[in-house]
Image: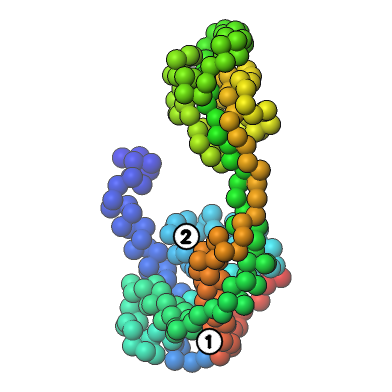
Amino acid sequence: MTVRAFLKEPLAHFLLAGGALFLLAAAWGGEDETGRHIGIDREDLLVFMQGRAQVYDEETFAGLLDRMSAEERQQLVRDAALQKALYREGQALDLASADPLVRQRVVQQMRLLLMEEAAADMSVSEEEVREYFAQNGNQYRFDPSMTFTHVFFQGEGAQEKAAETLKTLRGRAVPFEQAGQYGERFLYQLNYSDASQPIVASHFGEDFARAAFALETGSWQGPVRSEYGWHVVLPVSVDAPRSPAFADVADRVREDALAEKRQQAADRALDTMLARYEIDVEDGILR
């Protein structure tokens, strides 16, 4: 059996996971879990990185660690120390035994407990909601939208067919509802109502979307090229991007403001808990 074939076997996954847990136990098993001292060395960081990514390849992560900036290493040390601290706090509450097989679950449980306690019964005032909207209004902007129909051609001579059909459509003043009598079947829709620019781009391509939103409304225009062929387009209306009134999105803003407030409270709780520990970093880790 080749190495590639072996790595596809369920047994290989089991052995790799077991090896990672063995490394985790070796890295953490000898420490005084009751004290306030947390030691972080290179091996701790490599074990932490592999466990977080659920990918067990020490050589790859060693390379990633070596290429990290000082700021990235500082954050990594904090995350690894936080995980150890959370585990110890969870162990003090007897959430699980010291078995390394359940260490990750204990850390997750302790993190959730701290976050839930920090954000319990939290609410936001009307003033906080409006302040959040004032600071984050751009994320509630409505995309430009367009109502249109089109006639599609593809393959050899498609552009010429579209140009000839444009003359026919204009000459006969073909209305919106009769567009389906011309051209070829398109992969997506024939008619689009209040379609946002991202939606149009996802169906036709970015170049088509930019061109279509610049067309004059009320008459057949084109030909316009898409990722699939050529189109003759009848734009009915084009609405520019706009910022909604607060009342139109108040409920959504309130949910977002509360979520941010809860996250900030949870982050403070984690920092407060971690501050109770003395973190001793091996020489050369932070440079």
Picture layout, residue 229 above or below residue 259: above
Query: At x 56% / y 11%, what residue is drawn?
Result: 172
Query: How far across and how far down the image is residue 247, in percent?
Result: 57, 64
Residue 277: percent from left, percent from top: 55, 88
10 Å neighbourhood of mark 2: few (<14), some, or many (≥20)?
few
**From what the image shows, is residue 265 above or below residue 164?**
below
Label placed on residue 53: 2
**Which mark identifies residue 45?**
none
Depth check, front residue: 147 or 114: 147
Judging from the image, what secondary structure is the residue with disc 1 in? helix
How many other residues sit within 10 Å of disc 1, few (<14), some (14-19) or many (≥20)?
Answer: some
Q: Quarter of the image holding residue 19? A: bottom left
Image quadrant for the N terminus? top left
Residue beneath label 1, please? 273
- Local secondary structure at mark 2: helix
Who's the residue at 65% across and 55% down the image? 243
Q: Nearer the viewer, residue 90 or 185?
A: 185
| Residue 78 location (% of width, % of height) | 58, 75
> In the rendered view, does 257 fall on the left or right side of 99?
right
Specify the amino acid type for callout 2.
Ala
* Location of residue 254 in the rendering, given as x and y in whole percent from the top left corner: 53, 70
Q: Which amino acid is tagged 1? A: Met
| Left or right, residue 193 beside residue 90 | right
